[in-house]
Image (cartoon, rainbow, N blue to C red):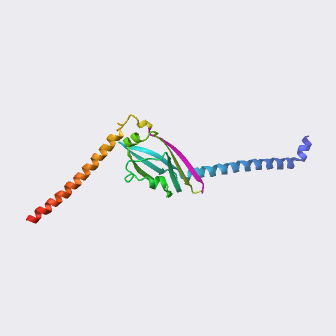
Amino acid sequence: MFEFIIQHLSEISNFAMAIATVIMAFYTKRSIDEMKISRKEANKANIVFYVEQKEQNLNFIIKNIGNTMARNVKIRSNPEFKTDEPERFNFDSIFKNVIPSFPPGFEIKCSFNDTVYLLNEEKNLRYDVCISFIDIYGETIEEKFLIDFSYLNGLFLKIPNDIDSSLHNINNNLDKLVKNHNSNSKSLINEIKKFK
């Protein structure tokens, strides 16, 4: 047996070297694959959606906390966010359109309407927000966020709809009264100037 090993030592060592080479190649490939995944993770875009509350107002914040550009960003909400003042709180630019490019560190802040309106109008205070975008590698990424406003129940006084609408009517009538007063004051001043 010992003579056999000595006679075939070069073949045995070549065979052992071949096995060692295959093992090294396998681990090298695995290491390279892990480095590619790690590099991809470190360089990807990462868009987040969260809500910031300031007194009775809510701010929606969409931010790219990743390191690269995101393209064709789509943000959808189920159910859709509603507002009592659509001309003031225009969500179409964020929730209905596509944002063509979203650079790293970029942030969009959108003020929502009064929290009291949300509590009065909405029965379901849970929203699923879905954000999809294309990263620099051409892959479509989808992120889902659950926004739950049910913690606000009991924190704010709920106003019945008829009182709320009455307050809006009073506010509108006061605005009209002030405008009419200003107009009448100008007319009166013009008439007084004519007598001078």
Q: Is residue 67 magenta?
A: no
Residue 105 in view of the camera: no
Q: Extreme left residue here? A: 196
On the picture, is 78 further left or further right than 57?
A: right
On the picture, is 24 further left or further right than 81?
A: right
Residue sitting nearer the eye, 32 or 75: 75
Residue sitting nearer the eye, 182 or 58: 182
Span colored in magenta: 138-149
Magenta region, main secondary structure: strand
Q: Is residue 143 magenta?
A: yes
Quarter of the image for the C terminus: give it. Answer: bottom left
**Residue at x-position 71% and y-position 47%:** 27
* Relative image position of residue 144 (x, y in whole percent): 53, 45
**Residue at x-position 16% and y-position 57%:** 185
Q: Extreme front residue here? A: 162
Residue 72 in view of the camera: yes
Residue sitting nearer the eye, 28 or 44: 44
Residue sitting nearer the eye, 87 or 144: 87
